[in-house]
Image (cartoon, rainbow, N blue to C red):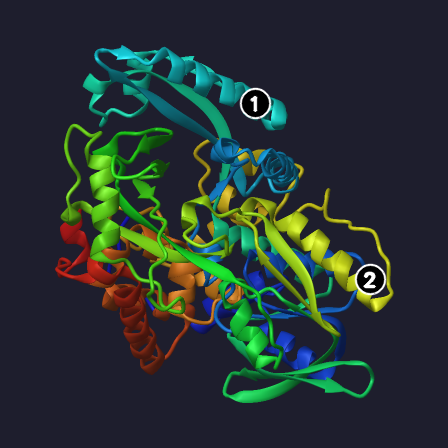
Amino acid sequence: MTLTAPHPADNAILARISQMAASEPLAHRTAQRDRMAAAEFDVLVIGGGITGAGVALDAVARGLSVALIDKGDFASGTSSRSSKMIHGGFRYLQTGDVALVRESLRERHALQRNAPHLVRVMPFMIPLFLKGGVINPKLSRALGGALWSYQFAGAWRLGRRHRRLSHDAVGAHMTGLDMDRIGAGYLFHDLRADDARLTLAVLATAATKGAAVLNHARCVGVSDFAKGGRTARIEVDGNQIEVRARMIVNATGIWAQEFLGVAGIASDRKLAPAKGTHIVVPRALTGNDIAVSLPVASDRRTVSVVDEGPFAYIGSTETTDPADVDQPTITEADVGYILDGVNRHLKRPITPEDITGGWAGFRPLIAGGKGARSADLSRKHSISLEAEGLVTVTGGKLTTYREMAEGTVDAVCNALGKPARCRTRNLKLHGYSTGASHLQDGDRLGKRYGDRAVQVRQLASLAPGMDQTLTAMGETTVAEAVWGLHAEMATSLSDALLRRTRIALYDGRAVLADADRIGATVGALAGWPAARITAETATLKSTLRRELGVLAHDIPTRAQDRS
């Protein structure tokens, strides 16, 4: 069902929505803000991406009092712009970084154990290409051997083993492939997760345990206070508050150096932000039912084609683009690189007009030696005591966020003189349920909300229009956006469509084309006045034009025109 004219929610419906959301740990933003201004904390975390969220959860689970802020929305930086894979880093074996592979596979298993409602198995296929009409036996043996090494490094914990695929099996898994150059393939398994929703679940778990968390709250200064800690000046909602903490954790990712400047601390820390871009197309064009890795002819990298409902996303690039890290955007060069990389393997080339959406972001990699390619830089992390009362954590990757957080809080506890054992290794995340009903195949909401899928389904049936999909191709409903606004601390239409749901990533051109109708429908059912609906819609359009970059040009006048 696609969007029709909006049906304003009456007071009874709005009261029911508020009642349904009232028990959610991220539902009461004003109370979180007021609590921060009134209390003193053991730890203030700056940065609400996956790293900061992990630090907040680890610290509060050990019994420390914790506050966390982010200058934008939660996960609005790198943590909503990744490849959305929870993986061991199979390609890191090529560089001999076995320790990182083992760490990643161990953490992969921990996430599967603690958040089975958010992570799911991702079959991954590597085609074997023909040369002179035959498969290179040396290459085939090397790939098979590397997969065995991956298995022994810890991939065995998933309970699945890699296997060789026939020519026909490869073609069946991706019907859009040009099979004339492919002889066979290999299949192995990793995990996948919606990065932004994983971050939200970690934050919600921390809030449930007593952490105060707040988005759209910018730290503009840090000073000492007499009792032996620091005071952070925070701009939030047009006002300035002071938050006192004995320790501050700088978990700002690619903005780590910038925050140290705000705190007045000199540092020789070197980061190498690496830009990664993904594009999205209708999955009917690629025909893949699993993730597929394809080599790029122009360099030593690969692009992945990943199935996601009616869509497939393809990426990523890896460049040291000089563009502003505060406003990553998709460029013509990004699109060209990805299309050149994937089209040489397809029966029917993908055109720029086929693209439905995409995203670009920067990875906070630790700088290597002179001339090092960003693709070759390590995904290891760094934890350091910058000054009395301030710890910085940088680098790392989505999969290993929990271990990064554990090491960071170890450093915090040592500095505070409060030794405490880490408690997150077996800590279930928000939405976890011992029942398996929300994990059934085809249960899209269960795989995004866990046991909260029940409330989202109830919301969809609460008022006419709630069960409508936001775009013709996508599966995201109005109810999911409204739930994000009421229960998950989304403060705007952009927050709801970019990070609580992901429809503005996967079908961003359709959302931009039909933004007025989407804004009116969501706003009416969220209970917004007309002036706010107009303002939110205008902001959404501006945000999407910036995010989509070159893809924002020449869009259809209505989202339905793309169906």
Q: Is residue 313 above or below residue 146?
A: below
Identity of the residue furthest to the front in this view: 370
Give the distance between the C-alpha atoms of the residues marked 1 and 2, in whole angstroms: 37 Å
Marker disc for residue 61: none
| Label whose residue precedes the other's in the sequence (1 or 2) | 1
Determine the image quadrant of residue 111: top right
Return the residue nearer the eye: 455 or 446. Answer: 446
Mark 1 lies on a secondary structure that is helix
Q: Visible in this render: residue 483?
A: no
Q: How many marks?
A: 2
Residue kind at label 1, given as amino acid type:
Ser
Residue 366: percent from left, percent from top: 53, 55
Determine the image quadrant of residue 324: bottom left
Mark 2 lies on a secondary structure that is helix
Residue kind at label 2, given as amino acid type:
Asn
Q: Is residue 487 above or below residue 231?
A: above
User: Which residue: 24% across, 68% down?
Assistant: 516
Graded by Cα atoms within 10 Å as few (under 14), some (14 to 19) or many (20 or more), the crowding at tag 1 reads some
Residue underneath mark 2:
414
User: Which residue: 54% across, 60% down?
Assistant: 49
Q: Visible in this render: residue 538?
A: yes
Residue 106: percent from left, percent from top: 65, 36
Residue underneath mark 1:
149
Return the residue nearer the eye: 208 or 203. Answer: 203
Residue 52: percent from left, percent from top: 61, 61
Graded by Cα atoms within 10 Å as few (under 14), some (14 to 19) or many (20 or more), the crowding at tag 2 reads few
Residue 124: percent from left, percent from top: 42, 28
Q: Is residue 550 above or below residue 223?
A: above
Q: Is residue 159 above or below residue 387?
A: above
Return the residue nearer the eye: 500 or 392. Answer: 392
The reply to whether callout 1 and callout 2 are in contact (CB within 8 Å) is no
